[in-house]
Amino acid sequence: MSNADLLPSLLLKINQNQLALEAAIMELTLWVEQHGADEVGGNVRGALETISENEEFFNMTLAVLMTPE
């Protein structure tokens, strides 16, 4: 497998890790908010919004990279 073939697979795994971390952080955020730290929860949600905003672009790029020529 060439380096060019590895890149899409690597990016896919990185994206999967990123989404898993997002889910875990959101679970912690919900717990924090339930314990009265709404401001902290809001800050975390704001930071996680970046992942959501970039997800569509990331998925489209991966689809292009993984399409056989």
Image: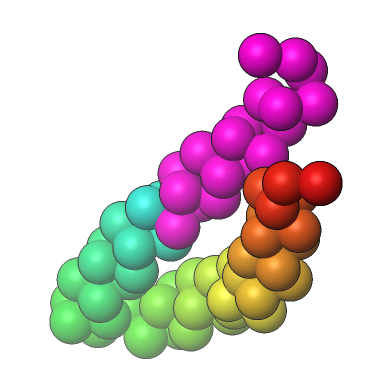
Q: Magenta segment: does it hold 23?
A: no
Judge whether 56 appears above or below 19 on screen: below
What residue is at 70 percent from the left and 68 percent from the top? 60
The residue closer to the viewer here, 25 or 14, is 14
What residue is at 61 percent from the left and 32 percent from the top? 10
Q: Magenta segment: does it hold 14?
A: yes
Locate residue 45 relative to residue 55 in the image: left or right.
left
The residue closer to the viewer here, 22 or 31, is 22
Residue furthest front in the image: 69
What residue is at 66 percent from the left and 14 percent from the top? 1
Q: Is residue 14 visible?
A: no
What span is in magenta? Answer: 1-19
What residue is at 56 percent from the left and 45 percent from the top? 12
Picture coordinates of residue 23, whole percent (x, y): 34, 63
Q: Is residue 3 visible?
A: yes
What is the image's colouring?
rainbow
Picture coordinates of residue 3, whole percent (x, y): 77, 18
The residue closer to the viewer here, 23 or 13, is 13
Judge whether 31 appears above or below 14 on screen: below
Picture coordinates of residue 5, whole percent (x, y): 71, 27
Locate residue 65 relative to residue 39 in the image: left or right.
right
The residue closer to the viewer here, 5 or 11, is 5
Residue furthest top in the image: 1
